[in-house]
Amino acid sequence: MFSVALEGDKDFETCLAVAKTIDGNHFYSLHFYEHLPWRPAWSLSTAVAPYLKRLRVGPVTVPANLYSPAVNARFLAHLNTLAPGAVLGVSRGAYMGEKRAKISEVVEKVKMIVDEYSRISWRSSSEPEVYVGTSGPKLARAAASLDYVKGIVVDNLANPRYAQYLRNIIDETGRKDLQLIARPFTSIGEDMDKLLEALWSYVPELVGDSPMLAAAGINYRDLLAHEPGVEEKMIENLALGGDVDTIVEKAAQLIRAGVSHICFGHPLGENPVKAVKMLRERVVPVLVEEFG
């Protein structure tokens, strides 16, 4: 499966244009990041939803402590009545500071959201999909134990070796059905400046001092100090960047490593609408032909 993720720094017209470009063209869903202080992902999702014909949409991922489970459940139910299908991802919250949730809190909040949702009398008969966002093995195992969680979303996952590591962890829990959703930063084109700007800006918080960063061969202190060599490792292990052929090959490597769903993430390209057109016309069809 293939999806696209949009940051909330984009205006509604751009979001809608991207949504219409990928709707019904081998794309499964449109994610909106919930990154403070950008536009709220719930609002963008509900604004775009009525225009969609096949595409699922939703905030992926919402920090577990940003909204109450009751609020998330009501938003999810409402979104699911507007769109062909709704998705919601829940994570610890990279930008929440001291309010960042513990692993146990994420698990508990997801349970509460699902329970609250089940009590909503006006919900749609179709079921939304609930994901957990993490790059760490502990939360991945914990999330896999919840049968109503349909996927593990891993921001900046572009390293096939780490993808295989996570796939093995998920499979060991008995959840071979659980989607491993890689959501690498993506930029189509020869100019890497925009991609590097996004990586330097986001990776210290979004990936942090984590096992995935270590697997990329990056020392966290070197990352913070902008040491030489870090750029190349970030592009290689945390992003899909380059021309169409490079994007196709790196995505194919992830699929071969056990990734079941690729979500092409921020910043997409200098012009996001043109970038997703290239994904639609020149990247995804090649991958669909090879992998189905």
Image (cartoon, helix red, strand yellow):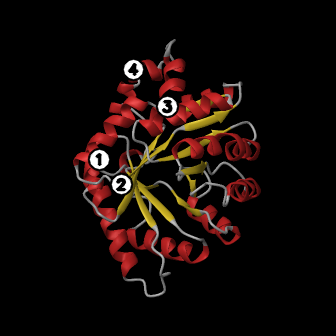
Distance, label 2 to label 1, CA atoms, is 7 Å
Q: Which residue is mark 1?
A: 170
Which residue is situated farthest in the bottom direction here? 121
Rate crowding at label 1 as few (under 14), some (14 to 19) or many (20 or more) other CA atoms within 10 Å. many
Give the side of residue 285 with respect to residue 80, left or right.
Answer: right
Rate crowding at label 4 as few (under 14), some (14 to 19) or many (20 or more) other CA atoms within 10 Å. some
The answer to whether the residue labelled 2 contacts the one labelled 1, judged by CB atoms less than 8 Å apart, is yes
Say which label, 4 or 1, has the lower sequence index: 1
Question: Which is nearer the eye, 4 or 114?
Answer: 4
Give the number of the mark in front: 4 or 1. 1
Q: Which residue is mark 4?
A: 217
Say which label, 2 or 1, has the lower sequence index: 1
Q: Reply above or below: 240 against 99.
A: above
Residue 82 placement: quadrant: bottom right
Q: Reply above or below: 237 against 13.
A: above
Distance, label 3 to label 2, CA atoms, is 22 Å
Say which label, 3 or 2, has the lower sequence index: 2
Q: Reply above or below: 187 against 125.
A: above
